[in-house]
Image (tube, helix red, strand yellow):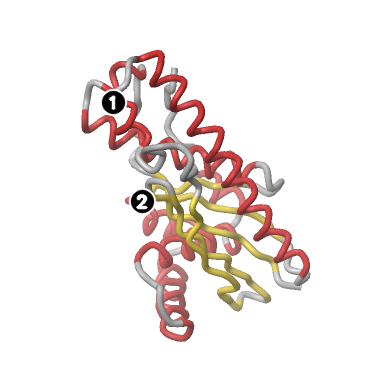
Amino acid sequence: MDNVAIGIQVHSGWGALVAVASDGGTLTILHRARLEITSDEIAGSKQPYHFAENLGLLEAQKYLGNCAAASSRLAAKTLRDIVERLQSEKKPLVGSAILLGAGRPLSSLDSILSSHPLIHTAEGEFFRRIFWAACCQLGAPVAGFRARDLSDCATTVLGKAAKIRLEQKIRTLGKSIGPPWTSDQKNAALAASLVLLGEKRKVRACSHEPANLAIS
């Protein structure tokens, strides 16, 4: 029976998901998807902090709360549908991985909305936290790897030689299954593979959570 892990590279309003299976160390890409997690019924929800920048603070709080609730529902449903599909194929989910940002601390909502660079940072963390929470609801361990440290994490978890072989394997899989196979899919596949193949204690040592984020 194949074990499966999913990896997600997060963008503003969506995520690139790759589901990776391992059977005796042989990797297979089972599924790729672009997961849209914003509601067309909420104006500006793909860039919620940019939209909230033009609102009063109390109105911004309410708006961001509505965006978070809608995106959380969509993320949870989409991931649950994927997991149920895998389960129907007798491929159990053993873990998931989220690609994270640099982990820059964020302060109050008022401070965020007063700084355009912080608005960009906050939006990234907003959607990472939503995907993180949705993955936690799946009942399998969740690991967070900072994207800039992913290659170093792979070396820590697997060793240098095994990491090089894994990265080559992921590049080869991309050639065989065709596009899209950009850095989004490669990073998601590598992160998922670390969850599948690495020792749990080493994965935990490299794992982080998304930065704390104020919407109030």
- At label 2, the amino acid type is Asp
Image spot of residue 91 (x, y percent): 73, 68
Which of 169/211 is in front?
A: 211
Residue at (44% x, 27% y) in the render: 64
Cβ–Cβ under 8 Å for marks 1 and 2: no
Labels in figure, total? 2
Residue 117 bears which disc, if any?
A: none
141 up-or-down from 112: above or below: below
Q: Residues within 10 Å of mark 2 (few under 14, many from 20)?
A: some
In this view, the residue in front, 185 or 160, is: 185
Residue under label 1 = 53
Q: Which residue is mark 2?
A: 149
Q: Residue at x 50, y 26 (%)?
A: 65
147 or 123, which lies in front?
A: 123
* Quadrant for the N terminus in the image: bottom right
Q: Residue furthest bottom?
A: 176
In the image, residue 25 sits, relative to residue 18, either above or below, namely below
Dividing the picture into quarters, in which one does residue 23 lie? Answer: bottom right
Up the image or down, 186 lies above or below 81; here it is below
Dot 1 or dot 2, earlier in sequence: 1
Answer left or right for 173 relative to 3: left
Residue at the image position 42 percent from the left and 50 percent from the top: 10
Q: Identify the image quadrant of residue 111.
A: top left
In this view, the residue farthest toward the front is 41
**Which percent across, then down, holds residue 69?**
56, 33
User: Element under label 1?
Assistant: loop
Residue at 40% from the left image edge and 13% from the top image edge: 58
Marks 1/2: CA distance?
A: 31 Å
Residue 146, position as x, y percentages in the image: 39, 47
Label 1 amino acid? Answer: Glu
Tell me residue 62's x, y (percent).
47, 21
Residue 11 left/right relative to 79: left
